[in-house]
Image (cartoon, rainbow, N blue to C red):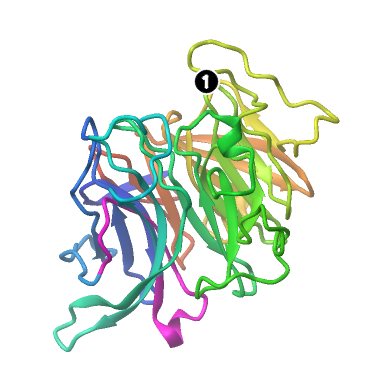
Amino acid sequence: MKSETIAVLENPWSLAFLPDGRMLVTSRPPTGKVNNPITPGTLRIVTQAGVVSDSISGLPTNVGLLDVVLDPRYTSNKLVYISFMERDPTAPRVGRAAADLSIDPAGLAVMRGTLVFGSDGIAKLQDAQVIWRQIPKIATPAGSGEPGGRMTFSPDGTYLFVAAGDRQEMEAPLIQTLSNTIGKIIRIYPDGSIPADNPYVGRPDAKPEIWSWGHRNPYGLAFSPSGQLWEHEMGPMGGDEFNAIASGSNYGWPLVSYGDDYSGTPIPKPSAGDGFAASALWWVPVIAPSGMIFYTGGLFGDWKNDALISGLQYHGLVRVRINGSKATEMQRIDLGSRIRGLAQSSDGSIWVVEDQPSGALRKLTPIF
């Protein structure tokens, strides 16, 4: 495989191709040991020649941008969707650090705005509005994460799915409930309204946007070419999962896991009849999956319709083949660094962004 470094970016998190071949790239500044991060993320345009724009204006107040996706009808409406983290010192105090008043609650949110270009060619987001917020916001110790944040549209473009992480909370009463959106996958219309056929609409004890639940840290969310929604999530000490997502299903976290607690304490393993949806594939030791696409191009002919999963702990890509509800790991592609996200160009090349601190944007093509 040929790998070219096209540009070096500051803390890139996700990328999406515009119709003209340029890329939108988001950033999430490192939180490190900062209890209340204040540095906002950036949204930039990067050309395939490596020219990087200034940060695009019009973003909402944030402490880091996560995923970016285009509206399925982008060519006509120019709408862009971004998931991001926001702080709110006035939010109810929930989470492991709730008693520490020096730490503000923070949480996942999703916005959309219109990407417009001025006569000078400079882009900005116009009429940006928040269409969804995870509830509740969580007060977490410095450096805590697990926001999830990956997004995808249904194949017909009708629904927007958002993966909302557990924010590193281990409390089953918080995660194994339908009254909040911690550790859930949600399904909304592109304007943020709730589809009437979501599985928990009408239940007074449930958030109506919930599609599935019992998730830990879902950093991959994509529809296969056959129309099945797939998700991957990081396990604790072992037990990363690859799941076929079904409406109303509970995937068991933190009551069951293929891994164990970081303390070494065993977590009950999934078993037939336990009431939880089983994973199609899992990894022990972990690969720390961070992003996913289904490859539909022609450059890598043997990969057609396979899932490509970027890895943080595994420094590269993991290729997975789907056969109905079954999944099989086919190949590992060592790229030598932590990979945060990936996207496919219209020519079939694969583009990846390395995790901080390197931040390289790389183009992958076959060697003929």
Relative to 198, is 144 on the left or the right? left
Relative to 30, is 120 on the left or the right? left
What's the residue at 18%, 81% (across, down)? 121
Residue 298: percent from the left, percent from the top?
A: 56, 61
Residue that label 1 marks: 237
Most foreground residue, 365 or 319: 319
Magenta stretch encompasses residue 60 = yes
Most foreground residue, 248 or 280: 248
What's the residue at 64%, 30% (across, down)? 282
What's the residue at 35%, 30% (across, down)? 97
Residue 161: percent from the left, percent from the top?
A: 57, 61
Residue 144: percent from the left, percent from the top?
A: 35, 33
Quadrant of the rendering where the N terminus is positioned: top left
Classify 96 as above or below 210. Answer: above
Give amino acid for label 1: Met
Relative to 216, is 37 on the left or the right? left
Magenta stretch encompasses residue 246 = no
Q: Quadrant of residue 235?
A: top right
Residue 87: percent from the left, percent from the top?
A: 29, 50
Classify 7 as above or below 138. Answer: below
**Furthest residue to the top?**
264
Most foreground residue, 181 or 24: 181
Tag 1, which secondary structure?
Answer: loop
What's the residue at 52%, 75% (across, down)? 72
Chain part drawn in magenta: 59-80
